[in-house]
Amino acid sequence: MRFRTESSPHMIPAHSVGGVMQQVLMALVPGTLAMVWFFGWGVLVNVALAVLFAVAFEAAIVAARKRPVMATLGDNSAIVTGWLFALAIPPLTPVWVTLIGIAFAIIVAKHLYGGLGYNPFNPAMVGYVVVLVSFPREMALWPAPEALSDLSLGLGQTLQTVLTGSLPAALEWDTLSRATPLDAMREGLGSGRTVGEVTASPLFGSFSETQWEWIGNFFLLGGLYLLFRRIIHWHIPVAVILGVAIPAGFFWMLDPDSFASPAFHVFSGAVIIGAFFIATDPVSASTTPLGRILYGAGIGLLIFVIRTWGGYPDAVAFAVLLMNMVAPTLDHLTRPRIFGRSRRGPPPGDGHA
Amino acid sequence: MNPTLTEIIRDGLWHNNPGLVQLLGLCPLLAISGTMVNAIGLGIATTLTLLLSNVLVSLIRNHARPEIRIPVYVLIIASIVTAIELAMNAWFHGLFLILGIFIPLIVTNCAIIGRAEAFASRNSVPRAALDGLMMGLGFTGVLIALGALREVLGQGTLMDNAHLLFGEWGHGMTLQLYPSEHGFLLALLPPGAFMAMGLLIAAKNWIDSQFEAEPAPSAEDTAAEPEAGNI
């Protein structure tokens, strides 16, 4: 009897790219639902629009590059990019801002560099930074969480606001939007108040504002699921969180009046989602174990530095993009020893290999 | 080998364009192309400098000793730029204030000393003059294209502040294409300049590849793609 001989590879990887991206999308669901709960339908509308645009742009640019469209769309990476972008922008962002951001993310940051796997920068964060730098006014309009405000927009009103860029009658941005905790902290410290006075506001929970803590917790849940499924490794998330918390803790112990607590830093803004979902992008992050730790710690440190002394209230996107630039060098410098070889390269005792 | 006059014209304007192909003088090109009027102002100043420096360098090409030719060229270029700077200060004062340091910096524009060394020092005066003029116009063309692109995207206008260049009647030349509060701020910032420049270079390579004979597209295509990616 003849046995069929198959050519290598004999072990088929458990995760295809499309499968990994599907897991990431599933892990994003709890945090996204928490954001919908606190910020209303706008989050969902943004996610739907951004994913739609991302897939459309991906299909168009892949067709223009004369590559197989359906095979590329099957890796689901455009959906993840669109989804992450949508979570980064305020819930009632006008639709044209989303369109421009996604266009930059997919076309410029991803496909001009050669498509998935070749992009040195995280596409979603490139798109977000482009709109953040270009349209500061639209990007500042975080609405008050619904729990804190009597005003809540229905699905129809939300759609109208997002699509036309103007609020329904009798509503004003001033009544609807308010500062995020990081904004409040930044403004408060800038105008000479102490951390204690800023956090004394009833809006603040134990660490940061209650709803941002909860959003962080739900993203943490999704992140732990990814860790459990071995989609991501622990190095980057842990390093990012410690990278924020350790310098924040150091300065907080020096002067608790003018530096916010490490817990505030970790649970405000985008640190949790950034640590688990954005910094762990397999394409643009470092890939060696030590490199991942350095990469994550660099992101964390940059987040703290830019938040504390920089020009923007939150800094996850900037920090990730800056460390993306360093990732290839980190990989090169932290390459693990190859089995059977000494750290310098050739196997021991074999000088001319 | 001596290029024909048509070749000189074609090289300056397209095939060997200082901005798009030689990538010389990028510093003023990227810094000053925020609006079309700034671009035109700097373009004219640079073109004049290129024309005059090429003529003067060509005139002395048989007299300057080769060991000291570069300092001599720099002296010539610096004198011309100083004269142009004073002239702009006198007659286009508003524009002079906006362009600021980038007028004196024309001295260091590599496109100018590059043409002096590579072309004017080896060619007769009329040919050097034509080369200077065409290189200058090529540079100005890129500046204007970049300026127009960035101004339209960034603030929704074309020829804003035209009165600085054309006098009082220039006020009427400003075109408002869309309300400026939604301007694409990135286009006005330095990264926008680099991206727009990359897109222009990609566009030029793409146009070239369209005109090229069918049998040899591969070299041009592969050369064009990483360039586009580098923005």
Image: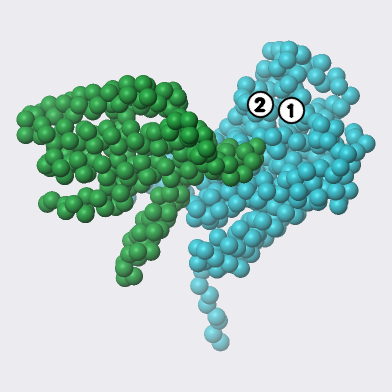
Chain colours: A cyan, B green
Q: Is residue A52 above or below residue A320?
A: below
Indicate the secondary structure of the residue bearing disc 2: helix
Q: Position of residue B228 (x, y in %)?
A: 44, 51
Q: Position of residue A45 (x, y in %)?
A: 78, 51
User: Which chain is mark 1 on?
Assistant: A
Residue A45 seen anywhere in this rendered image of the structure:
yes
Which residue is denoted by mark 2 in the rendering?
A307
Indicate the secondary structure of the residue bearing disc 1: helix
Mark before the other along the chain sequence, 2 or 1: 1
- Mark 2–mark 1 Cα distance, whole angstroms, equals 8 Å
Q: Position of residue A192 (x, y in %)?
A: 73, 12
User: Observer-nearest residue: A299 or A189?
Assistant: A189
Whether discs 2 and 1 lie on one chain: the answer is yes
Residue that appears at 52% across and 77% down: A5
User: Observer-nearest residue: B96 or B100?
Assistant: B96
Q: The residue under label 2 is which amino acid type?
A: Arg
Residue that appears at 68% across and 40% down: A274
Q: The residue under label 1 is which amino acid type?
A: Leu
* Rendered image quadrant of residue A147: top right
Residue that appears at 37% across and 21% down: B89
Residue A282 seen anywhere in this rendered image of the structure:
no
The answer to whether A307 appears left or right of A113 in the picture is right
Which residue is denoted by mark 1 in the rendering?
A182
User: Observer-nearest residue: A304 or A38?
Assistant: A38
